[in-house]
Image (cartoon, rainbow, N blue to C red):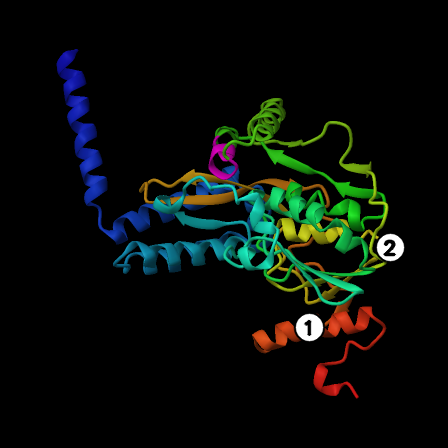
Amino acid sequence: MKRRFLAMAILATLAASHAQAASPSESCLQDLRALPGFLLENDTGARQHLAQKGQAYFDQAQASASEAAAKVNDEGACNMVLSQYLQQWRKGHLQIMPTAVLKPVTPAPASSAATAPSAAMDNGAPSLRLLSPHTALLTLPSFFPQYAQAIADLLASKRKELQRRRNWIIDVRQNDGGSDSTYASLLPWIASGESVTMGIEWLSTPANIANQESICALYVPGDASCPISMARTMDRMRSVPPGQFVAQNADAPISYAKFAKEKIQPARVAVLVDRDCGSSCEQFLLAVRQSFHVKLIGRNSNGALDYSNLRVQALPSGLRQLAYATSRSTRLPHLQVDLDGIMPDIYLPPPKDEAGRAEEIVRVQRWLEGGSLRPVDEVQ
């Protein structure tokens, strides 16, 4: 028996040594081969994508990716090949991440939201500019969980200034999403008192349940509410056989939530949006456009919301992690955001440069204050 255990240990050591000695192309092909089977079993959108596009489409995508993977000379090139392959499945909420950079985040300091200069040091931190006695500009580059307190602190510390401005511009252009709870402190300022929300369904599989357990430590370390929420989610997932979907809430797929409004709300709110607003940023658009005071201005959003709640799975090489969707919206198939994003109420052509991006704010401010949305050089 001891000899058998010794032999097994030697084989395991040899296998590990072989994995470490694998060339970039060998490890890349190893990870590529693992993707389709894992996606079809665990990703909430993969089966629907296969039904829509057909097996031949994905066979060709796999063949092209295999040819490219066989030629890579470094891990960066492999990551690019695998990312391009995932794009054939779905343009959003599928991602390849190097294992080396997948580390727990550090919460942003609460004071970073108080002033624009310190916020500028963090590209994801919220900031506030008082454009005039009538208009305020709230810039929200990210809804990642570490910015939830920063947004709440900013709104609280600038309450009097915000109450004096009847017009708000909320800039979510290039907002990379994150968590719906991050913008919760903003909703009482601009919502009409009740929100109508469609729920989600979780796909129950052993991998999805296991990957729920690690997400809190990875993205919101120290958050006491996250493990409680994930425990409820895992209980729901365990309540059905593997391979089946289960609703997040047992009551109904749609909820009508009332909440207290701020006593003094802005009269007009313009939300600036573009193609880089995705995921939770799009959920924010669905929430705020229900308000009588809000108009969405700019371009269609990204279109990465129908399949969400990303979790990470280590790929066979150990060099990369796959981020994939574990939930789908109960809006489907009647209201699909992923087709072409969320349309704005008022369309503005894409700006040519940063100066054009800045000019959009000037135009919207002028419009809110009773003027025109025309480009600056066309205003008489």
What's the amino acid at mark 1?
Glu
Res. 343 image quadrant: bottom right
Residue denoted by label 1: 360
Q: Please state which of residues 329 and 162 is positioned toward the viewer in this rendering.
A: 162
Q: Which mark, residue 327?
A: none
Q: Using the rendered image of the protein, determine whether residue 5 is visible from the camera's viewpoint.
A: yes
Q: What is the magenta range? A: 214-220
Q: Please state which of residues 176 and 67 is positioned toward the viewer in this rendering.
A: 176
Q: Position of residue 310 (x, y in %)?
A: 54, 42
Residue denoted by label 2: 292
Q: Residues within 10 Å of mark 1 (few under 14, many from 20)?
A: many
> What is the chief secondary structure element of the magenta stretch?
helix
> Where 139 falls versus 100 (above or below)?
below
Q: What residue is rendered at 34% in x and 45% in y?
A: 100
92 lies left or right of 330:
left
Looking at the image, is mark 1 or mark 2 earlier in the sequence?
A: 2
Q: Residues within 10 Å of mark 2 (few under 14, many from 20)?
A: few
